[in-house]
Image (cartoon, rainbow, N blue to C red):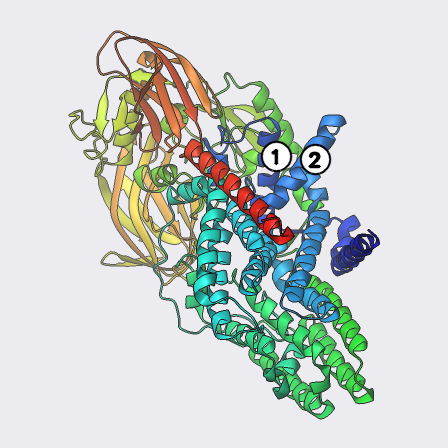
Amino acid sequence: MFQNQSRWKQRGLLIGSMLFISIVAHGFFIWQQPNGLLMKGINDGLSQMLPFKQFIYKNYSQGNFFYADNFGIGGGIFSQLAYYFSTNIFFLIVSSLLFIVESITKYQVNLNTWVQLILPMSILKQTAILVVAYYYFKTVKISKKASYVGAVIYGLSPFFFRHEMYWDILTDAMFWLVLLLIGIEKIMRKQSPTTFVVAVALIFINNFYLAYVNLLIGFFYIIIRWFVHCSQQELSIKKQSKYYLSGGLLGFGIGSFAFIPAALGFLHNARPPYKDAIPLIEIQDNIVSNPRILWLPVFIVIALSIKKLYKSKTFRFFAIIAIGGTVMHFIPHVGSMFNGFSAPQNRWEAIVILGYAGVFAVAIDHIEYWKVSQFNRTSVIFLLLMLIVSFVDPTFKWGKDGIIFLMTAVWTISISYVLAKGKSQNTIILLVIFFVIGYANVFQVNRLTEVDKNSYASTTQFMESDKYNSNEQKRLIQYMKRHLTNDRARIDWMVDDRNNTPIVQDFKGVSVYSSVLNGDVLNMYQKDLQIDMGRESVSRYATLGARTNLMSIWQTQFYMRENANQSIPYHYHLVKHSKNYNVYENKKLLPAFRVTNSLYSATALENQPVLAKEHAMLQGVITDNEQTTKESKVPETSIKKISTVNAKWNGDVLNVQKKNGGFDLHIAPSQNTKDLYVQFHIEGIHKKESYNLQVNEDQTMRKKSDSIYRTGYNDLTFAINRANTIHIRLSKGEYHITNIHVYGEDYSILSDALKYSKGADIQWQNNHASGVVKTTQPHQMLVTPIPYEKGWTAHINGKKVAIEKVNYAFIGIPLMNGENEIELVYKPPYWTACLWVSIISIVLFSIGVYRQRKRNKGID
């Protein structure tokens, strides 16, 4: 009993001290919090991480777990947001606590709640990482003191702080990776495989992307350990493989209810393959004095330089990881492999930092090998290396980065002095811990807090500005929400480039930004309908390009823009005005759910202008059925003349010689024309920066030629007001421009559709839609505004029927003559089967654990 009390006391002291270290390591942001500085990136941090936490929590707390009709124009939140937080265990723990607080008090969780939790959640997660890292080093038979300092080196690395600030989902990997490695080591060392199964299961549940990264790292870890035996008695490779295979399958089975829907959601995503050449070697980071992610401190270099330490197999193992990982940091192909063979990313490097930590931890356990003369030589060499790298590094600035340089220099001199006076393990450990804590705070100041740049820290003041969520904007949003004519009506409004504005400001919009989205919707925007979103970028869609036809089809009642904006869709009239914004309204909207028997073939329309496709959707529905014979064509407005402005043509290449140069299209539109649809193909030639493209009152931004975020779709369409001259203006540079066409729109087809379209009384809320439709004609189809996505099932009069993809990205349901009682339900793909697999796997795992405990007690 007393032994157990002592054990729990030791654990309490361990966790308490780790918590204290984490708090001190976050000292700078804690100190700056009263001034409004937030440990959250101004871009993805505010555009994705915080909004998705609030969005998922709100849906989960209301009992909606699978699908949200206000996730963009509708989407599966369980599967598509599994990359973020829908199955994130750290998030779910915090959410459960918040739900309890909200249930027993009057407190209401909102976006500001998650702002206030930024630091507490980061500190607690880092504490968990420190604790699990400590137990990992203990598992590989490193002493308690050495394990402690190793854990601090690992948990307080720049890798943690950078990712926690910008993409805090990625710091989870630091915890789950180490838990997985503990499981692997226990199998190797003839201990229980339970930890391995639990780790694999939780990794599959937590995040499907990190599961790929961590399990791939785990695979390479096992291979290296098979060649470097760190303990006297280890299982044979054959027996280990048996445990890894059976335990891995069992862990996968337990986590399949979360992993499989998430993986299927990812496969339904649409992101262009990375086609750029990947260099063999790329020096993209100054890891000795000004790192972005991977930091190689002087004490690691010193430890690696001690020859006698290589007698230890454990040291050799960690040295292989440390040295090999450092080299691979500069090989982009490695980053590409860990990113699914896509664009190179450094999200795998937690294992390298663990190698650094392991190297120093083993060195602490063998302090008798340390020599003052050797340390002094290595320190001088390291300082010279820092100096050389600093001069070579073009980003190094002595004003700020020099602080780190001087701090490291002072520490190097200090450690040499301590060693000269005598070998004191405790002194060295304390010195390293103090230095790592100090460096963590210096890194936050130096690398994470340049508020004036759009990729660094955010502030509460910024969150309340017109660049994010101002009071003026909120008042106008409330006005529009009060005047929506039905629950399907939407608002076309977005703050600058923040596609998740509808989530932040809590309204049904037509924009969203997420790494995993419905691929059919993305393709519809970028390829099929060429909707200008104001900014080219993958993993997002936004607005409806001021195209009245589309806005009517998707019930976009309100259109809000800054006062200076001149791109106002036809039929929209000013109804509200404020200091900075105008609100326009159009009540002439098509029914959300319509019945039609006019079917158009997507194949036949493939080479038609997008205006013809819009007309087909107004008059009926576009299907994948190639046997349909209806046609939709529009006459082209002839271009009388093309003249250049501060530019020259060379074949299909336009050389813009001055800023805002370009060319003009001279036309003579018909008298009935209200708007013009301008289509052309454009590609920037060797553009080193993003460039602006303006077509009369409409303007958009295109990515630079080597951007990993360019869509690969370069056929564009702009809807502009009627004019005799179309002015196309570009930034200075060369562009390949072809297939220029102009079409006139008089909206007569829209007017007819508004008069004659047959609506259906269907109620849709999140993952459920139902209603009754009566038909008197054959071959009728119900056209819905619900995005087509695997997981939807339809029943008519209680009988399951097949759904079709119509209008490129939406659900269509063929109807029967007479009364059709319709019910649509969404569940994650293969949800029931996956749930049964998980339940059976949990039962099998529980039986295995029970039997193992009985064997350990000697009952069998």
Residue 569: horizontal and vertical position, in percent? 42, 29
Give the class, few, some or many, for how many residues have Cα within 10 Å of label 1's Cα (few <14, many ≥20): many
Task: Give me the disc on residue 98.
Answer: 2
The answer to which quarter of the image holds residue 607 is top left
Could you say whether the residue bearing mark 1 is in a helix, strand or loop? helix
Residue 644: horizontal and vertical position, in percent? 31, 53
Amino acid type of the residue tagged 1 in the rendering: Tyr
The answer to which quarter of the image holds residue 428 is bottom right
Mark 1 = which residue? 57
Given residues 722 and 308, the one toward you in this image is 308
Question: 488 left or right of 6?
Answer: left
Residue 285 higher or lower than 710, as above or below = below
Rendered residue at 15%/25% (across/down): 629
Q: Is residue 114 visible?
A: yes
Callout 2 touching callout 1 (CB < 8 Å): yes
Rendered residue at 74%/32% (across/down): 101
Residue 604: horizontal and vertical position, in percent? 18, 33
Rendered residue at 24%/17% (across/down): 597
Question: How many numbered discs, if any?
Answer: 2
Rendered residue at 54%/68% (across/down): 234
